[in-house]
Amino acid sequence: MKPTDGSKPHIIIMVGISGSGKSFFAEQFARTFKSPIISFDQLRHKLFDKPIYSDHENKVVSQAANYMLDELFKTGKTITYEGPSNQRNERTEIAKIARTAGYNPMFIWVQTEPATAKRRSIKPTDGRKPMTNDQFESKLKQFSPPHSSEGAIVISGKHTYSTQMKIILKNIATPNPNPAITTERPTRTNNILVR
């Protein structure tokens, strides 16, 4: 993927509740554009045989991901980032780091209603330990939807990848010059922002 402003590469930052489809989109996007991906979930499962999501484990995964990110910034190529970004302070921090490295942060918000996301999260897949109901509910309560000033591109976690990409490419081709000003008024439905 080529930068839209002619000079800065992008860091694609995935946002959404657990089970929304962030990982699926990030992996497909990285494959399509041959872009490196930093996936905290993949790192965790490479570093720990039986992840327990402890504070120590989270710290190790974060340190490994930050090292990878610093190295990838040197390439000047688009990067896909699928890590802590569900709270505004996390998104602000990663965007600040990216801008300092000469990157243009682009938030992709994958929206899926909580019932579907929960079903996906508590279902075991690929030998990975599923979330418990309590873990999912806790993560859901911690989620902070992107503010309009963050300029997130919204896609549905229930659409096909090709449909999702059409939305992304359309938004890249005609970006909003001032993301704080939107032409559509957002509304809330079941804790999901609909544009």
Image (cartoon, rainbow, N blue to C red):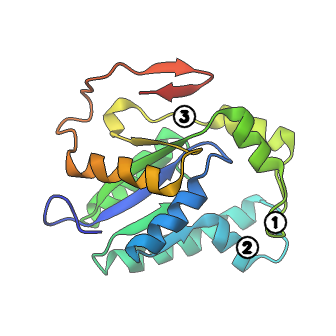
Spatial distance from mark 2 to mark 1, Cα to Cα? 8 Å
| Nearest to N terminus: mark 2 or mark 1 | 2
Q: Are marks 2 and 1 in contact (CB under 8 Å)?
A: yes
Local secondary structure at mark 3: loop
Vertical position of residue 114 compared to residue 64: above or below: above
Q: Quadrant of residue 80?
A: bottom left
**Nearest to the observer: residue 36 or residue 86:** 36
- The residue beneath circle 2 is 45
Q: Residue at x 81, y 66 (%)?
A: 128
Between label 3 and label 1, give the one nearer the viewer: 1
The residue carrying mark 1 is 128
Q: Position of residue 187 (x, y in %)?
A: 46, 18
Can see residue 60?
no
Q: Of the two numbered discs 3 and 2 on the same chain, state the one appearing first in sequence.
A: 2
- How busy is the neighbourhood of tag 1: few (under 14 within 10 Å), some, or many (20 plus)? few
Who comes first in sequence, dot 3 or dot 1? 1
Position above or below: 71 against 102: below
Tell me: 66 left or right of 4. right
State how far apart marks 3 and 2 are (Cα). 26 Å
Query: Which residue corresponds to the image point at 40% horizontal and 80% vertical from the top-left?
Result: 71
Question: Residue beneath label 3, please?
Answer: 144
For the view shown, which residue lies furthest in the left direction?
Answer: 6
Amino acid beneath label 2: His
| Amino acid type of the residue tagged 1 in the rendering | Arg
Which secondary structure lies at badge 2?
A: helix
Q: Is residue 51 visible?
A: yes
If the image is split into quadrants, where does the C terminus sit? top left
In whole angstroms, how far apart are the C-alphas of marks 3 and 1? 26 Å
